[in-house]
Each structure stands twice: as structure tokens, then as C-alpha cells.
Amino acid sequence: MKLSFKNRIALYYLLATASMVTVVFVLIYFVVQTAVYQELDDDLSYEAHKHSEEIFLRNDSIFFKNKNEWAEREHREVRVNPVFIQLVNNAGKVMDKSPNLMGDALSFDPSKAFDLHFDTGLNQQEIRQIQLPIKQDAQLKGYILAAMSLEGPKLVLASLKKLLLWLFPAVLAGLFFITRFLAGQSIKPVQLITSTTNRITQNSLDERIALPAIKDELFTLTSSINELLERIQNALEREQQFTADASHQLRTPLAVLKGTLEVTLRRPRTPEEYQEKIKISIQEIDRLSVLADQLLLLARFDSETSALTPEKIQLLPLVNNIVKRYQPFIEEKKQSIKVEIAPNLEVNAAPYYLDLIFENLLTNASKYSPQGKEISIRGWTENGHIKALVIDQGMGIPLEHQEQIFHPFFRSKALDHKDIKGNGLGLSIVKKACAALGIKITVESTLGKGTCFYLDFSAEVVERLWVEGRG
């Protein structure tokens, strides 16, 4: 049976309350039963002890003194419960009894302990009985038996049981409707959240759920959903901007390539002219190829981050390999690279991503540094963290652009250095690779003096990558 959330809450409340009501009703019944029996037993004990003082012994016989007087007195006292009194000898033979027993007699049970109350019967009627010994000179002479009818107490308990059995379903039915109403009131904020989120689409991501007045669990849930919507909206806006920028960047070399080929086909040309146009076309194709590779690389970060396999990597050999790889490009600009990294410095990282980071930082430093300048790469340990930096002596980055240089396709003052080739994706790749490896990257730059990129290999973040199963 499928129930709505509101009915499920009401049902759970009902089951919990039903258990408590059951316990309470059972306790009420047993408390009343105990009180009724206690009152009856007190009366029995009172009558038995009172009448035990009104007997006399003659040889082996036991009789009541002034039997008629105490029988009449019984009708004048406040305790009006009919009491049956009987005297028996050691053998259980009836010696005397109260007038109200008439032709009946109380049953004597020698197995019952003295001064113990127990249920028995008299002329097909339930009674409560007690047996007390009668002694003379420390010798047992017989017993006095006292009994009262259980009809009244049984009637009270039966009425109470009937009342409780009728009340139980009535209470549960009332509780169900009350809890259902309260559950409906309680889930109204959830219904508001649901209706608002149903209205939110890709074209209305700026709408937010109204926060509840009370800062409870629903307030936290609403805040979390609003924050999630904010992140989704930001991600979508970045994706739309990225798509627009990517299409623009791809369109430019394609337009150049198409224009070059169209101009080439307008009239016959010399072999030298054809070679020149083909070279321009190849350059644009290479540019397209690099751009496509970088775009694919950026797209892969989101899908492959969870599959990273960090391992211990010696930093110095990795940086030396990158420097050796780009040595011809460095020498062409007559630049020099100074590497100061401890020989045994190790970091936990994915080798491919770490190579990307230093490769892009190094090529970026070389591109934006004039000829003959020095580039420094350093690495050290500080407060348990491994840190590294890449310093150039280039043109520097304006302060207002330092937050934007990691955005895709952003190039600071691109028009001021048209001779420097690039599409603004290198530092975006560095930023995403650092985020994937848990490396904190920051930048400091001064116009006309140079730029420094800091890398902080946080041991805590790397350890988290291993714990989450990425290693």
C-alpha cells in the first residue's frame, strides 16, 4: 500500500502513540485492579482480626461470643461490605459461622498460607477469602475464615476494561486525524520547495526558494538547495560563455584558412606563392589542432578527476624533463632557466596532470618574458607542505586582471602583444589540473617586472584524494 508522505508521517505518529496509549491503558487497568483488591483485602483483614477477638474456646470446640450482637452491629457500621465469617477446627470441621452463610459454608484449604488473601467460590459466586489460625497457649486450636464477595470489584474492573477497549480505537482515530493535520502543516514548506523547484528551468535559474522564518532543518535544506541552484546557474553561465568563446576561437582560424584557400584559387600562381599559402594554411590547421586538444583537455577534467591515481613523484626529474623538452624554444629566445629543487623532494600527484601544470607555467613564462631573461623554478618544504614557484621577468599582469587570468580564453591586454601567440586556455588548464590534484595556486605580479605563480601541495587535500578512493 502506497501512502503519501503526509499519511506516512501520520501513520508513524499513530503507531508510536498507539504503543504509548496501550502501555498507559494497561497500567491504568492494573493500578485500578491493584487498588480494588487492596481495599478488599484491607476490609477482609480488618473483619478477620476483629472477629477473632469475639470467640471463645471450650475443650475442642470454638464458638462466637454474643453472636447475635455482633451480627446486628455489622449492619450499623460504615464498612457495609457483606462479610462471611466461619470457624473450623484443626480437622477443618465447621464449628460456627456467621448467619449470612445460612446453609452454605466456606471451603477450608490447609495448603494456603496463613494471612494470605486468595480467590475462591461460594455457591457459584466468586469471593475473596483469608484464613487466620486460632491459638491458645501457643497451641493451634482451629482457624477463622473471612470472605467477601468479588461481584462488586469484578463489575468495576469489567466496566473499566470495556471503557478502555472502547476508548482505544476512538483515541487512535482522533490522533490519526490530528497528526495528519499537523503533518500537513509541517510539510507545507516542503510543498513550497517542490512547487518552486518545479517552476525552475534552464531559463529561470535565477529564481530562489523563500527561506523559512524558523532556522530549523527545513531552513538548512532550503539554503542548501538555493546554494546548489546558485552553483548550477554559475556553472551553466560559465558553460554558455565557454561555448561562445570556443566557437569564436574556432571560427577565426577556419575563416583565415578558408580565405587563404579562396584567394589561392582565384588565379594561377607561382610555386613559391602556392608554398606560402600552403604554409599559412598549415599554421592555421596546427592552431586549430592545438585549440581542439586544449578544449578536449578542459572537458576531460570534469569526467576524469574522480579516476585520478596519485602516486609519489620526484619533482626535480619531472621539471628537468620539461625543461629539456622545451630547451630549443628557450634557447631561441636566448633565455635561461634556473631550477632550485631539492633532489629528494616528492609529491603525491597524478604524473600527467603535474606535467601539464609545470609545462604550461614554463611555456607561459617564456612567452611573456623578453629575450635574454631568466626564468626560475623552485621547490621546498614548509610547515609540512611542499611548495613550488615559477618566476619570470616578463611584462607582468595588471592587478585587476589577476583574478581573471584563469578563465578560459582570457588574455590580459591581448592587443598590446599581438606578436605573442596564444588562445588563453593554458592557465585555465593549469587551474583545473591544480584543483583536481588539491594544489593551491596563487599569483603575484608587478607590471614591467614579472610574475610569480605559487603552488602549495597541501598534504591534507592529497590525503583526502587517497581516502576517497582516487588512489
Image (spheres, rainbow, N blue to C red):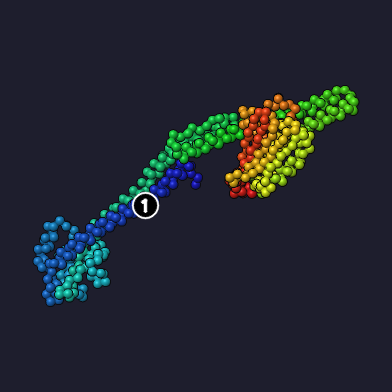
Question: Can residue 417 be seen here?
Answer: yes
Q: Residues within 10 Å of mark 1 (few under 14, many from 20)?
A: some
Comparing 306 with 161, the one in front is 306
Residue 268, by quadrant, is top right
Task: Determine whether, in the image, residue 190 is placed left or right of residue 45.
Answer: right
Residue 80 against residue 444 in the figure, above or below: below
Front in this rendered view, residue 109 or 134: 134
Q: Secondary structure at mark 1?
A: helix
Q: Which residue is mark 1?
A: 22
Give the residue displayed 85% in from the left and 25% down from the top: 264
The amino acid marked with disc number 1 is: Thr
Residue reaching furthest bottom? Answer: 59
Residue 93 position by quadrant:
bottom left
Determine whether 93 is above or below 83 in the image: below
Q: Residue at x 63, y 31 (%)?
A: 402
- Say whether residue 56 is left or right of residue 152: left
Image coordinates for residue 112, horizontal then vertical, percent: 26, 69
> Depth check: 25 or 455 in front?
455
Give the image location of residue 127, x and y in percent. Answer: 24, 62
In the rendered view, would you say 401 is above or below 343?
above
The location of residue 167, given as percent across then percent down, is 34, 48
Q: Residue at x 31, y 54 (%)?
A: 29
Residue in view at x 63 percent, y 34 percent? 443
From the viewer's perspective, tell me whether residue 169 is left or right of residue 432: left
Q: Residue 123: tell me if it is visible.
A: no
Q: Residue furthest top?
A: 267
Residue 450 shown left or right of residue 111 in the figure: right
